[in-house]
Image (cartoon, grey):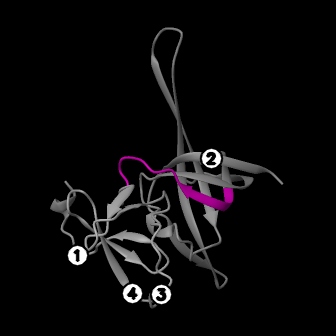
């Protein structure tokens, strides 16, 4: 088995697809390398890796949006195909992921710290958008509210998952 680890940015939102009655997730991850030539010229090379994941119920799936930086670990395979565009034989790498993690960054949808408005308690949110809040006594569909320092609202779901509130307008994010 060939194993691979990759850190890169998603080129588009991850998609759930179905084949032969089984659902799976597909995404394309770009890894870019930059360097200077001996003559001082800037160069860049981007390699696109196709990634599949057999867990369409993954907790990370709602956050796999274009531009998000991810870490992928899985089994690697090489595929050879004929390009319809230029009629040449090409090769590509595919990773069957068994682990996908968000690497975070300044473009995150959810900040690293939020506040419970009723009590003023500050809650840490990890890179998978889970807050360390005891929701064990909640019913399945109970929602709580968290806010950031700018007053933007976030929904806290049973189990601790945090998502941006769906009723916010886009101007509130600036």
Can residue 85 be spotted in the picture?
no
Examine the rendered structure and indicate whether residue 116 appears above or below residue 107. Answer: below
Which residue has dot 3 on it? 137
Q: Nearer the viewer, mark 2 or mark 3?
A: 3
Image position, residue 79 (x, y; %): 71, 53
53 relative position to 156: left or right: right
Q: Give me the C-alpha separation between circle 2 and circle 1.
A: 35 Å
Which residue has dot 2 on it? 6
What span is colored magenta in the figure? 95-108
Image position, residue 7 (x, y; %): 57, 45
Residue at the image point whose x is 49% and y is 29% from the top: 44
Image position, residue 126 (x, y; %): 48, 58
Label 1 Cα neighbours within 10 Å, binned few <14 / some 14-19 / many ≥20:
few
Q: Nearer the viewer, mark 1 or mark 3?
A: 3
Examine the rendered structure and indicate whether residue 85 appears above or below residue 165. Answer: above
Examine the rendered structure and indicate whether residue 150 appears above or below residue 167. Answer: above
Give the SS element for disc 3.
loop
Whichever of labels 2 and 1 marks the residue nearer the N terminus, that label is 2
Which residue has dot 4 on it? 142
Q: Give me the C-alpha separation between circle 1 and circle 3.
A: 26 Å
Camera-nearest residue between 147 and 133: 133
Q: Nearer the viewer, mark 4 or mark 2?
A: 4
Whichever of labels 3 and 4 marks the residue nearer the N terminus, that label is 3
């Amino acid at each position: 088995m060939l194993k691979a680890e990759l850190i890169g940015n998603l080129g588009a939102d991850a998609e759930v697809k179905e084949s032969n009655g089984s659902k799976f997730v597909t995404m394309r991850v770009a890894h870019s390398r930059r360097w200077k030539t001996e003559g001082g010229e800037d160069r860049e090379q981007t390699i696109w890796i196709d990634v599949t994941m057999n867990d369409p119920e993954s907790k990370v799936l709602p956050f796999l949006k274009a531009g998000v930086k991810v870490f992928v670990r899985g089994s690697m395979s090489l595929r050879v195909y004929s390009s319809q565009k230029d009629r040449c034989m090409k090769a590509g790498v595919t990773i069957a992921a068994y682990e996908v993690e968000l690497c975070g960054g300044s473009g995150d949808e959810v900040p690293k710290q939020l506040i419970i408005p009723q009590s003023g308690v500050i809650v840490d949110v990890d890179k998978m958008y889970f807050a360390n809040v005891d929701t064990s006594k909640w019913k399945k569909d109970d929602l709580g509210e968290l806010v950031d320092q700018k007053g933007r609202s976030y929904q806290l779901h049973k189990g601790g998952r945090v998502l941006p509130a769906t009723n916010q307008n886009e101007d509130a994010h600036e």
